[in-house]
């Protein structure tokens, strides 16, 4: 691999991101902050939910922000570059293997996903006010989960961006992303589904479950959560699956 070419492609994506900085900030923070304000501030301050819910909610919102940003940052430009602007053709002419063009897309998406997740923490803390009890006892676990979640989100974005058509974008978010979010334990711990045993087992095929539970175990271990080894193994498996699927679809799309 030509490292200089790889870094040049990454720098190009960085310049595009800087030009769209305001849009990216709104896209990244608007939905999570609305969730945090309604559930973490309004509902708890009015007494409809306990104060402790703020701390339990925050890791889920962080996971949601990272996944949404990572998928969007990779999938949407790919749909545009393959089907509208044809900009991908310039990238494919670079002196680098086709797969490394896709890896660069994943890497750029990871950076955006990590930034969106880390920015959510202080912003959400300010919006929620008092009562947020983040203990942060396992910084290495937190770093590992963040990297795995960001990789999953961007590699999933690669797979989706190389698979869906321009007329299927809305369908992707309504039939794929939205159900994954609502059944991804972002607003509640996995243990809350104990009274729905079948559903509790079915949701384990959803990678967002492990994203939310992993961040919960790293930031607020006082709440119920899946064990860290289970989370790490599951995220590695999902990362591998979406990476292989995404690279295969990217090469197929690029050649044809």
Image: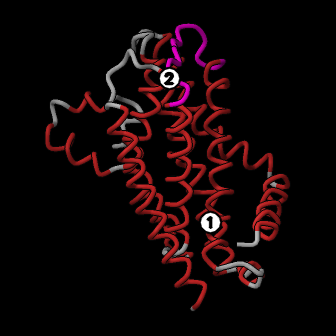
Q: Identify the secondary structure beneath mark 1.
A: helix
Q: Which residues are magenta?
A: 126-140
State left or right for residue 186 relative to residue 117: left
Does 113 sit above or below residue 224? below
- Residue 116's tag is none
Query: Residue tagged by mark 1?
Result: 103
Q: Identify the secondary structure beneath mark 2.
A: loop
Q: Residue at position x 39%, y 33% from top? A: 213
Query: Residue tagged by mark 2?
Result: 138
Q: Residue 193: where, in percent of width, then height? A: 23, 33
Check if residue 131 falls in the magenta segment.
Answer: yes
Q: Residue 243: where, in percent of width, then height? A: 49, 64
Tell me the quarter of the picture where residue 50 sits. top left
Q: Residue at position x 44%, y 70% from top? A: 245
The crowd level at tag 2 (other Cα within 10 Å; few <14, some 14-19, many 20+) is few
Check if residue 234 falls in the magenta segment.
Answer: no
């Amino acid at each position: 691999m030509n490292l200089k070419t790889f870094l040049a492609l990454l720098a190009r994506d960085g310049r595009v991101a800087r030009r769209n900085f305001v849009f990216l900030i709104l896209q990244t923070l608007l939905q999570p902050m609305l969730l945090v304000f309604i559930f973490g501030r309004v509902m708890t301050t009015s007494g409809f939910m306990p104060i402790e819910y703020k701390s339990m909610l925050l890791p889920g919102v962080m996971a949601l922000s990272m996944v949404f940003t990572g998928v969007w940052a990779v999938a949407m430009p790919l749909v545009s570059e393959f089907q509208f602007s044809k900009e991908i053709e310039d990238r494919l002419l670079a002196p680098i293997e086709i797969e490394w063009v896709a890896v660069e897309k994943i890497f750029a998406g990871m950076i955006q996903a990590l930034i969106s997740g880390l920015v959510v923490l202080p912003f959400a803390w300010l919006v929620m006010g008092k009562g947020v009890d983040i203990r942060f006892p396992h910084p290495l676990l937190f770093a590992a989960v963040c990297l795995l979640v960001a990789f999953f989100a961007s590699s999933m974005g690669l797979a989706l961006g190389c698979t869906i058509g321009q007329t299927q974008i809305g369908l992707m978010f309504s039939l794929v992303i939205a159900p994954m979010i609502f059944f991804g334990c972002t607003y509640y711990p996995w243990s809350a589904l104990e009274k729905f045993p079948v559903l509790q087992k079915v949701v384990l095929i959803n990678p967002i479950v492990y994203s939310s539970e992993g961040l919960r175990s790293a930031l607020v271990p006082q709440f119920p959560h899946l064990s860290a080894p289970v989370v790490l193994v599951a995220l590695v498996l999902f990362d591998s699956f979406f990476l292989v699927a995404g690279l295969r679809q990217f090469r197929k799309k690029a050649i044809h």
